[in-house]
Amino acid sequence: MIGVLLGVLLVLASAVLGFTVRDEPPALDRELHLAAVHLGPDFVHSAAVVSFVLSPGLATIALVSLALRALLAKDPLIARSAVLLAVCWATLFARYAFRRVRPVDFPKWAYPSGHVTAVTSVAFTGVVLCAWLARRHLRLAVVLACTAVVLTAASRVVLEMHWFTDTVGAVLAVVGVGLLVGRALGLLPVGVLSRREQS
């Protein structure tokens, strides 16, 4: 029940933040954008590499891999994980409700960040799967997941493709929806479904 409540709160927080910042970037956004403008080419190059590796392409590969694995192995856990990833990633469509303009001229809306939405969706799903299949490595999975999300968010700000709050809103929405959908699919709390199936 706590997970459901937290999920609802995170989704609401993402929505409130989106409507709050869509017309005028707050001071924090402007200051971080200005700092990004003054970073040297080494930072920009590194950010471009991170943004290329940790991208929606990663989410596409992960989703196709999970779907194929579920189909070939007829594994309901993997099938539910594929659905979890897909629904989390679909939070990206919220950008059409907020219609926030990016820091630079670009034909797609800013909030939430597409890269951060995709990577956070993969990270969240990966942590859930690790909890089910390799629980002894869960702490490492969480660290790697958080690191990937932070690096992706930083890269998008450094490249001036997003405001900082675009990345925050993406994380809030994905984790919130992930908690709700994970509960609905029986993936959270971890282990509950397997005990039911055994009884």
Image: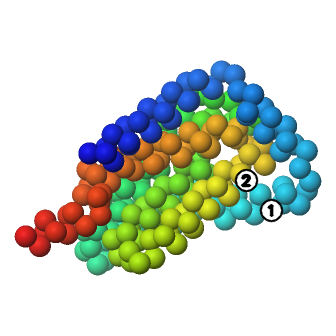
| Percent x, y of residue 155 | 73, 53
Asked if the residue at tag 1 contacts the one at tag 2, i.e. Cβ–Cβ closer than 8 Å, the answer is yes
Q: CA distance from mark 2 to mark 1?
A: 8 Å
Q: Identity of the amino acid at label 1?
A: Ser
**Residue position for label 1:** 46
Circle on res. 24: none
Farthest-out residue, left = 199
Quick check: 76 left or right of 177? left
Q: Quadrant of the C terminus?
A: bottom left
Which amino acid type corresponds to the residue marked 2 in the rendered image? Ser
The image position of residue 96, as x and y in percent, is 53, 31
Question: Measuring 50% from the left and 42% from the top, which residue is drawn there?
Answer: 172
Task: Give the color scheme: rainbow, by chain, secondary structure or one colour.
Answer: rainbow
Q: Position of residue 21 (x, y in %)?
A: 63, 26
Q: Residue at x 49, y 60 (%)?
A: 122
The quadrant the N terminus occupies is top left
- Above/below status of 84 relative to 137: above
Please name whichever residue, 128 or 54, is drawn nearer the observer in this view of the structure.
128
Query: Does 199 sit above or below residue 160?
Result: below
Give above or below for 75 relative to 4. below
How packed mark 2 is, by other alpha carbons closer than 10 Å (few <14, some 14-19, many 20 or more), is many
Could you tell me which residue is drawn at 41 percent across and 36 percent down?
A: 9
Give the quadrant of residue 71.
bottom left
The residue to which callout 2 is attached is: 155
